[in-house]
Amino acid sequence: MQYWLFKSEPATWSWDQQKKKGKAGEEWDGIRNYQARNNMREMKIGDRGFFYHSNEGLEIVGVVEVCAASHPDSTTDDERWDCVDVRALADVPAPVGLKAIKAEPRLAEMALVTHMRLSVQPVKPKEWKLVCKMGGIDPETLKPV
DNA sequence: GCCAACGTTGGC
DNA sequence: GCCAACGTTGGC
């Protein structure tokens, strides 16, 4: 299983909205960046990702699961753009802010820090575990710790 | 709301 | 294929 991080501006698509979609999940559409798209093409059903609020909040607030593999983005006819579907799995009880991530030396290599503008990015297993710990959630069961 | 960083577009 | 102009992202 691979780990990822999805950025969303809460004014456009918030964690609450994602949760309301429940198990059915929702397309992660609207991505118009090649690197972000390539990352989504790499994803497999069951991969997990963090849900990050950009612009407002600036924190990781939830965990999602990829529930449909890469397919054409329904919001455009441009065949260059694909996306996956994701569904909410769990809240992060203690949201992990960008500040906290930047303050943690072991997270200095996170794409969130090094590739600031990339909106869909990979997360290393070690980073995943540490961020889960910081957020008060068990990385395996996703239960609050 | 500003603006730096950076990705994309298009003329040559 | 270079690079200037332009548009967008996202932290502050």
Image: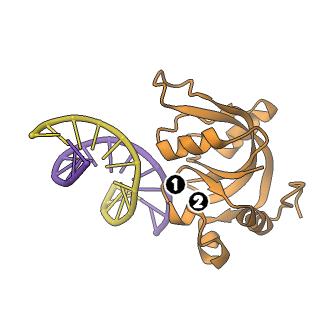
Chain colours: A orange, B yellow, C purple
Q: Which residue is mark 2?
A: A58
The residue at the point 53 percent across, 25 percent down is A75
Q: Label 2: chain? A: A
In this picture, residue C3 sits left or right of residue A91: left
Tell me which amino acid carries mark 1.
Asn
Q: Are marks 2 and 1 in contact (CB under 8 Å)?
A: yes
Q: Residues within 10 Å of mark 2 (few under 14, many from 20)?
A: some
The residue at the point 74 percent across, 33 percent down is A25
Q: Which residue is mark 1?
A: A55
Depth check, front residue: A8 or A73: A73
The residue at the point 55 percent across, 47 percent down is A9
Q: From what the image shows, is residue B4 above or below residue A1?
A: below
Depth check, front residue: A29 or A43: A43
Q: Residues within 10 Å of mark 1 (few under 14, many from 20)?
A: few
Locate residue A21: give its quadrant. top right
**SS class, disc 1:** loop
**SS class, disc 2:** loop
Q: From what the image shows, is residue A142 above or below residue A94?
A: above
Locate residue A125: give its quadrant. bottom right
Is residue A11 in view? no
Tell me residue A64's x, y (percent).
74, 45
Q: Label 1: chain? A: A
Tell me residue A114's x, y (percent).
52, 65
Tell me whether marks 2 and 1 sit on the same chain: yes
Is residue A41 in view? yes
Depth check, front residue: A64 or A1: A1
Tell me residue A73's x, y (percent).
56, 28
Locate residue A142: give its quadrant. bottom right
Tell me which amino acid carries mark 2.
Leu
Tell me residue A139's x, y (percent).
83, 59
Checking the image for residue A3, the label placed there is: none
